[in-house]
């Protein structure tokens, strides 16, 4: 049986054996910092069962991603734990990449970032990146690398306009709460990155965001949106701020020579037990890595 280990110590990254592979986990721990919870074995088994067995595209070269999960604001512990486990397992099982994990700002040193092909922000919140780290991340993506945002990643860059613009938007509330099951539509069913959904909309229990500026459809390709034609989803009124009723859930965009994939699914571990969600994330990561080609040019807002 695969095991999930949670180890804490002063430091940044440590290799440790799990009995089935070598995984890198973060060991940076300071007074008051939180660590993701240890998930029940039954939950981990469900995540493992949902993990794709093969990548959609063959990696053009050996790929390494850095998964960053630091939180200065709300801590999505279960979502971080589930996401980290799924990301590690997807890389191990498919060979699409090798994943390292950290919550230490030191990993943004240019010499360290240079080791990676993409950065994944797993449920990060209200990050306080030093100015040098901000510049390093911008150059990392703009010179051809990838950036992936999971769920609360859009709750990270309120004091860094360039970072918010690169990721594609800022969190502006979640009228669709985590206890509800909501409907989603595919903005472009035939798009390569929507193949995980089999050309059909879907329903999922999750916490769904609305976004404020710099969110716009003018610089990206929106892949998935809330389906407001569903009575339960469209009937939500409390907390709604967007008068245009444009509630995007996932998109891709270019940033210089680099590629960005963002998806707001992933508030809690249940989301990472869905095989279609994990296939969608794997394809998005492969797009960000440059291994899965997909059109990221903007499209007009679809009619509601």
Image (cartoon, grey):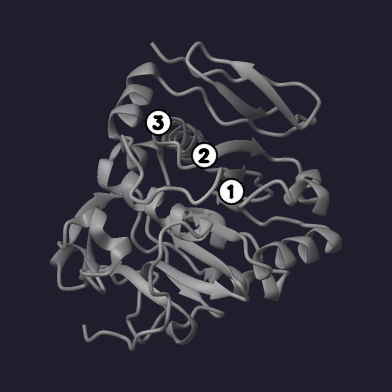
Q: What residue is pinned by disc 3?
A: 93
Q: Is residue 186 above or below residue 181?
A: below
Q: Mark 3 falls on what kind of element?
A: helix
Q: What residue is pinned by disc 2?
A: 80
As drawn, the label of residue 180 is: none
Inter-mark Cα distance, 2 to 1: 12 Å
As drawn, the label of residue 74 is: 1
Q: Residue at x 33, y 39 (%)?
A: 54
Inter-mark Cα distance, 2 to 3: 20 Å
Left-right relation of 259 to 239: right
In which quadrant of the rendered view does residue 23 lie? top right
* Closer to the camera in the image, 149 or 139: 139
Q: Mark 1 falls on what kind of element?
A: loop
Q: Are marks 2 and 1 in contact (CB under 8 Å)?
A: no
Q: Residue at x 43, y 35 (%)?
A: 86
Q: Residue at x 70, y 21 (%)?
A: 8
Inter-mark Cα distance, 3 to 1: 31 Å
Q: Which part of the image, by quadrant, shows the N terminus?
A: top left
Location of residue 301 in the rendering, given as x and y in whole percent from the top left corner:
32, 86
Q: Is residue 148 above or below residue 48?
A: below
* Closer to the camera in the image, 270 or 109: 109
Q: Residue at x 70, y 55 (%)?
A: 127
Left-right relation of 7 to 31: left
Location of residue 295 in the rendering, given as x and y in whole percent from the top left corner:
38, 74
Q: Which part of the image, by quadrant, shows the C terminus?
A: bottom left
Which marked residue is nearer to the observer: mark 2 or mark 1? 2
Location of residue 218 in the rendering, given as x and y in whole percent from the top left corner:
46, 87
């Amino acid at each position: 049986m695969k095991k999930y280990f949670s180890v804490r110590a002063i430091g940044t990254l440590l290799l440790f054996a799990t009995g089935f592979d070598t995984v890198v986990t973060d060991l940076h721990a300071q007074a008051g910092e939180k660590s993701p919870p240890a998930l029940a074995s039954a939950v981990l088994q469900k995540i493992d069962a949902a993990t794709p067995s093969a990548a959609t595209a063959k990696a053009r070269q050996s790929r390494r991603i850095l998964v960053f999960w630091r939180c200065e604001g709300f801590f999505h512990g279960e979502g971080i734990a589930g996401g980290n486990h799924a990301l590690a397992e997807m890389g191990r099982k498919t060979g699409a990449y090798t994943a390292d994990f950290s919550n230490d700002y030191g990993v943004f040193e240019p010499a360290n970032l240079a080791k990676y092909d993409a950065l994944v922000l797993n449920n990060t919140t209200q990050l306080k990146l030093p100015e040098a780290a901000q510049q390093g991340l911008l150059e990392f993506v703009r010179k051809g690398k990838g950036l992936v945002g999971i769920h609360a990643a859009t709750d990270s860059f309120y004091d860094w306009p360039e970072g918010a613009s690169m990721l594609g938007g800022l969190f502006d509330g979640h009228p669709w709460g985590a206890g509800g099951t909501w409907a989603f539509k595919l903005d472009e069913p035939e798009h390569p990155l929507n193949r995980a959904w089999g050309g059909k909309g879907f329903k999922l229990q999750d916490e769904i965001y609305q976004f404020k500026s710099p969110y716009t459809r003018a610089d990206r390709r929106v892949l998935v949106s809330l389906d407001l034609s569903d009575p339960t989803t469209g009937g939500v009124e409390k907390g709604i701020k967007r008068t245009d009723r444009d509630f995007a859930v996932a998109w891709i965009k270019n940033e210089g020579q680099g590629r960005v994939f963002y998806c707001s699914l992933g508030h809690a571990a249940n989301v990472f037990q869905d095989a279609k969600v994990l296939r969608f994330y794997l394809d998005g990561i492969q797009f960000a890595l440059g291994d899965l080609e997909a059109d990221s040019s903007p499209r007009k807002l679809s009619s509601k």
